Image (cartoon, rainbow, N blue to C red):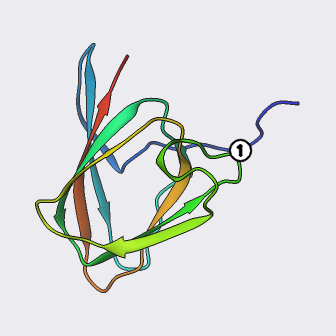
């Protein structure tokens, strides 16, 4: 049986791509959710602005948050996070401010 889920992009806008990386922009207004997406590569997230974000993980999600259904945390502009491939998630801005980050997807 195949995967019947509809996946979207890992962020809201692709800024640049070459043979080694994809660089994305993620912008979400308060209460807004991203598309369900799957991280097929390791990635780096660079937080620019916002106050609080959440992520809803699918039961078969892997990567950094395997076994968790939901995580939530504060945003710290300038903070850089690294995450391993395997996550299947929907990001949600659960804060009061617009969220903005740059996501660098590291191709194999």
Rendered position, 34 above or below 31:
above
On the image, the x and y values in percent for residue 10 come to 42, 44
* Residue ID at (62%, 46%): 61
Rendered position, 32 above or below 37:
below
Q: Quadrant of residue 44?
A: top left
On the image, the x and y values in percent for residue 31 come to 43, 79
* Residue ID at (66%, 54%): 58
Nearest the eye: 8 or 108? 108
* Residue ID at (71%, 53%): 59
Rendered position, 40 above or below 46:
above
- Single out the residue that lies furthest toward the top: 19
The quarter in which the N terminus is drawn is: top right
The residue that disc 1 covers is 5
The quarter in which the C terminus is drawn is: top left
Q: Answer few, some or many: residues within 10 Å of disc 1's Cα (few below 14, many 20 plus, some between 14 and 19).
A: few
* Residue ID at (16%, 59%): 79
Q: Is residue 71 left or right of residue 105?
A: right
């Amino acid at each position: 049986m195949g995967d019947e889920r509809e996946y979207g992009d890992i962020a809201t806008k692709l800024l640049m791509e070459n043979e080694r990386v994809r660089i994305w922009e993620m912008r979400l207004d308060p209460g807004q959710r991203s598309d369900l997406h799957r991280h097929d590569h390791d990635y780096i997230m660079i937080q620019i602005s916002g106050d609080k974000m959440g992520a809803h993980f699918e039961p078969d999600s892997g990567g950094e948050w395997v076994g968790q259904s939901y995580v939530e945390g504060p945003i710290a502009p300038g903070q850089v996070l690294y995450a391993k491939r395997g996550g299947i998630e929907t990001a949600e801005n659960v804060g009061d401010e617009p969220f903005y980050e740059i996501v660098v997807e590291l191709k194999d």
